[in-house]
Image (cartoon, rainbow, N blue to C red):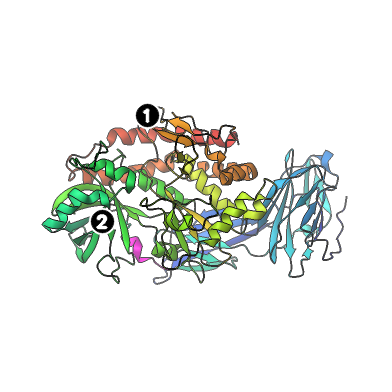
């Protein structure tokens, strides 16, 4: 059997004859070094976009990624040797599969792994596909028995494509392309991520690259091998204000000394703003547990703080940061949830906050061991989305793409809850979020990928969700709280969205507030109150009951009732399973996580000697380790049922 070369015209993209799978691979390799010292950097995440193709640099800074040249081999039986033909019309934006009876689903990816289209083949056998910019794309065809074929398609400015396939050869039941059929690909975009360095993207990678990373001075604050000290000195008046009116979340003046050396080396940061942190839900309950604000009681023994370095000096920076959070971990008996959870997100390529441990003193009184958490703000986004037109966009706290009202994305729709626009507030323009909502609201399963591709990186979103499920973040973006009817209000929380400043930039979800992860209170079942005890179906589980469910003292709506979750699950369910299983086999390995737990435990053991009245951790650390295989199996079952 032979696959003939096809003459291409503008109205016909290409004809792919494929009783094949290719054998070649494109290799990207090189060395990553520190820009200033030229020393090799170990542990850098090197990834082809947010795809399944990634690695980490070794002790010599070396990395190698093998990317398929045309496809990754999948076996086709000899009975399926008939040619499969797909006709892509770029002018009419259709993909004709009437000559491909064995194909039942189609995906189109950019060369760096971003999925821009995906859908089931309709009865007409003709799909609508998105209009694509100039570039190289990967077309993937699947059938009942898995992969039927992949090919790279080059789209020019004139909306033509060029793909050349030679003759196929057979070996037993395997079908593959001959060497002449391999199609050279446009270089993929590689991303480089390391906690101590600014991120970097390489648009034209090659073999034997030399990549230089610029050190990020913030990383000194987030050294996870040490416990630093934050010493605040307050006047008697300001101390009284904090103790009696701290629930109002108003800053008071404090002088800060940052002790960072093992021999007491320190620096005087000077005057900063200091306040309690806890939102309008948890913090008032510390001061008024009975809900009566006229009868204050002794506040909670340990409350989170927020530091604002610019409160009294607009030019003050602390290692380039304007704000910093000190989380009390009062609901975390292991004192590791924040550290583990944020780190797992970062290991998945998600730009999550960095963390470290610190002892906090107020007027020489030890308040306890806290976790220092990087604040998502404009400085944060500018350090994570590097390059012109990327890092100075809109940052939103806890506003979901669920409204056509531009004002909702400015103030969150609720007074005083802290949600809404967090950057560019002086001249707010939230039209991009409105467009994001409109694209979701008008999407169907068939056109969701096409409509949302300008707004989302689907692999990134799926990686985020796989991580959130694995760490059991039951109080995160998946969980929708509402009134008893579900008609007056319905909100989720503990996340940010970042919108790149370019008019056509993507919108990225960022995790936040990890204290409720790795739920530990129902040992040995680890049933969290929402998806465990409450039996609320997960984000990817369809449900006919979209009314509020009474769960303890709250009303919860199933996440799959939200259009974004529902459509993502229906279109990208298989991709979620693929990326989720890769996460389980790599980042979420029990042995790997146990090593991290041991490292943090050793630090905490030292701190416990100086922290009066804090919980012992040995029992809870043991239970946390024992829970890891169960958590992994829970996610694995979720993926298998996808």
Q: Residue furthest left?
A: 236
Q: State the residue at coordinates (82%, 66%).
A: 10
Q: Is residue 599 left or right of residue 465?
A: left
Q: Residues within 10 Å of mark 2 (few under 14, many from 20)?
A: some
Instruction: Give residue 357's position: percent from left, percent from top.
Output: 28, 51
Q: State the residue at coordinates (38%, 45%).
A: 514
Q: Is residue 112 left or right of residue 297?
A: right
Instruction: Give residue 523's position: percent from left, percent from top.
Output: 37, 28
Indicate yes or no whether the magenta region holds residue 511.
no
Instruction: Give residue 351's position: percent from left, percent from top.
Output: 45, 56
Depicted 334 relative to depicted 260: above or below = above
Instruction: Give residue 257's position: percent from left, percent from top.
Output: 19, 61
Q: State the residue at coordinates (70%, 56%).
A: 138
Q: Quadrant of the C terminus?
A: top right
Depicted 6 relative to depicted 330: above or below = below
Question: To which quarter of the image does residue 628 belong?
Answer: top left
* Residue 4 visible, this angle: yes
Res. 296 mark: none
Q: Residues within 10 Å of mark 1 (few under 14, many from 20)?
A: few
Depicted 536 relative to depicted 183: above or below = above
Res. 250 mark: 2
Q: How many marks?
A: 2
Separation of residues labelled 2 and 1 (CA atoms): 36 Å
Tell me the magenta residue range.
Answer: 214-221
- Nearer to the camera, 454 or 621: 454
Indicate yes or no whether the magenta region holds residue 218.
yes
SS at mark 2 in the image = loop
SS at mark 1 in the image = loop
Q: Are marks 2 and 1 in contact (CB under 8 Å)?
A: no
Q: Which numbered disc flags the more N-terminal residue, 2 or 1?
A: 2
Res. 522 mark: 1
């Amino acid at each position: 059997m032979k696959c003939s070369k096809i003459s291409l015209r503008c109205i016909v993209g290409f004809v792919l004859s494929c009783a094949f799978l290719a054998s070649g691979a494109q290799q990207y390799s090189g060395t990553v070094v520190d820009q200033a010292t030229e020393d090799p950097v170990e542990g850098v995440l090197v990834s082809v976009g947010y795809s399944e193709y990634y690695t980490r640099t070794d002790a010599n800074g070396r990395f190698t990624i093998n990317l398929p040249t045309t496809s990754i081999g999948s076996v086709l039986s000899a009975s399926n040797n008939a040619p499969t033909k797909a006709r892509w019309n770029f002018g009419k934006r259709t993909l004709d599969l009437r000559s491909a009876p064995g194909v039942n689903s189609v995906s189109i990816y950019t060369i760096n792994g971003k999925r821009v289209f995906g859908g089931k083949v309709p009865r007409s056998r003709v799909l609508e596909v998105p209009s694509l910019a100039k570039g190289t794309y990967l077309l993937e065809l699947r059938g009942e028995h898995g992969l039927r074929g992949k090919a790279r398609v080059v789209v020019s400015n004139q909306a033509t494509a060029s793909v050349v396939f030679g003759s196929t050869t057979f070996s037993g039941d395997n079908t593959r392309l001959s060497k002449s059929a391999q199609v050279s690909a446009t270089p993929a975009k590689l991303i480089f991520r390391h906690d101590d360095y600014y991120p970097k993207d390489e648009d034209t990678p090659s073999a034997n690259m030399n990549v230089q990373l610029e050190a990020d001075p913030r990383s000194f604050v987030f050294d996870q091998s040490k416990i630093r000290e934050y010493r605040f000195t307050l006047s008697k008046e300001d101390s009284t204000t904090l103790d009696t009116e701290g629930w109002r979340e108003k800053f008071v003046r404090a002088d800060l000394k940052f002790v960072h050396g093992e021999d007491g080396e320190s620096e005087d940061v000077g005057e900063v703003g200091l306040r309690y942190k806890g939102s309008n839900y948890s913090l008032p309950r510390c001061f008024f547990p009975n809900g009566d604000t006229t009868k204050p009681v002794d506040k909670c023994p340990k409350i989170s703080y927020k530091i604002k370095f610019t409160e009294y000096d607009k030019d003050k920076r602390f290692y380039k940061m304007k704000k910093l959070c000190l989380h009390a971990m009062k609901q975390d008996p292991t004192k590791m949830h924040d550290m583990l959870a944020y780190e797992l997100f970062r290991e998945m390529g998600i730009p999550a906050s960095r963390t470290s441990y610190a002892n906090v003193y107020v007027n020489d009184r030890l308040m306890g061991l806290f976790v220092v958490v990087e604040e998502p703000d404009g400085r944060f986004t500018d350090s994570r989305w590097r390059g012109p037109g990327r890092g100075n966009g809109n940052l939103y706290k806890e506003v979901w793409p669920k409204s056509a009202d531009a004002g909702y994305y400015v103030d969150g729709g609720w007074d005083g809850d802290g949600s809404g626009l967090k950057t560019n507030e002086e001249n707010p323009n939230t039209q991009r979020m409105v467009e994001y909502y409109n694209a979701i609201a008008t999407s169907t399963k068939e056109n969701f990928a096409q409509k949302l591709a300008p707004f989302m990186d689907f692999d990134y979103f799926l990686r985020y969700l796989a991580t959130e499920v694995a760490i059991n973040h039951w109080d995160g973006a998946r969980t929708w709280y509402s009134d008893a009817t579900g008609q007056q209000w319905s909100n989720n929380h503990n996340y940010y969205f970042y919108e790149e400043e370019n008019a056509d930039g993507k919108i990225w979800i960022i995790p936040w507030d990890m204290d409720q992860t790795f739920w530990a209170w129902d040992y040995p079942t680890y049933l969290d109150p929402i998806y465990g005890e409450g039996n609320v179906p997960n984000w990817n589980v369809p449900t006919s009951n979209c009314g509020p469910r009474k769960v303890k003292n709250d009303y919860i709506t199933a996440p799959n009732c939200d259009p974004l979750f529902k459509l993502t699950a229906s279109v990208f369910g298989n991709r979620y399973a693929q990326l989720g299983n890769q996460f389980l086999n790599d980042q979420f390995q029990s042995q790997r996580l146990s090593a991290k737990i041991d490292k943090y435990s050793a630090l905490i053991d030292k701190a416990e000697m100086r922290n009066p009245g804090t919980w012992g951790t040995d029992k809870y650390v043991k239970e946390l380790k024992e829970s890891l295989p169960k958590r992994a199996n829970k996610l694995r079952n979720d993926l298998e049922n996808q």
